[in-house]
Image: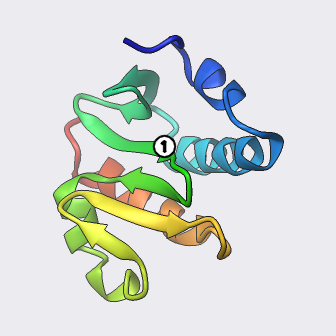
């Protein structure tokens, strides 16, 4: 069980520099999927509209971004240099976070998800 129930509570658990990144990811996703609901799912901040659109989380050395397998597959050529697996992208904390790419992937997921 988690000790948080909202995305605000999730973000508040981290140091200020990580909170800043998480807030910007949240804002980026919200701007690109404005009709999606926010919730915690699988212990992570999640944006949902008929299905999970994307999740994100902070790890020790990276930000995990989870746009489902089709969200990874559709951007394979743009994800060179990032560690990926089925439905997962790792953005290292020692490199700039690609917010523009996160925006594009979110728009893709919002367009392909159920309405």
The spot of residue 44 in percent (x, y) is: 42, 32
Between residue 71 and residue 45, name the one nearer to us: 45
At 62% from the left edge and 68% from the top edge, which residue is drawn?
97
Furthest toward the front, the residue is: 60
- SS of the residue under disc 1: strand
Q: Is residue 113 left or right of residue 91?
A: left
Asked if 90 appears above or below 40 in the picture, the reply is below
Question: Disc count in the image?
Answer: 1
Q: Is residue 78 left or right of residue 52?
A: right
Q: Is residue 11 left or right of residue 114?
A: right
The spot of residue 9 in percent (x, y) is: 63, 18
The spot of residue 54 in percent (x, y) is: 37, 45
Q: For label 1, count other residues whose C-alpha is less than 10 Å away and answer few (under 14), some (14-19) or many (20+).
A: some
Q: Which residue is mark 1?
A: 57
Q: How is the image coloured?
A: rainbow
Asked if 57 appears above or below 78 in the picture, the reply is above
Q: Quadrant of the N terminus?
A: top left
């Amino acid at each position: 069980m988690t000790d948080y129930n909202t995305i605000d509570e999730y973000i508040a658990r981290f140091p200020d520099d990580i909170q800043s990144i998480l807030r910007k990811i949240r804002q980026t996703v919200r701007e690109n999927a404005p009709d999606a609901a926010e919730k915690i799912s699988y212990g992570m901040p999640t944006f949902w509209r008929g299905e999970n659109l994307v999740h994100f989380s902070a790890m020790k050395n990276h930000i995990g971004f989870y746009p489902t397998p089709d969200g990874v597959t559709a951007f394979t050529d743009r994800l060179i240099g990032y560690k990926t697996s089925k439905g997962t992208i790792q953005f290292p904390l020692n490199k700039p976070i690609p917010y523009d790419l996160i925006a594009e992937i979110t728009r893709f997921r919002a367009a392909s998800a159920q309405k």
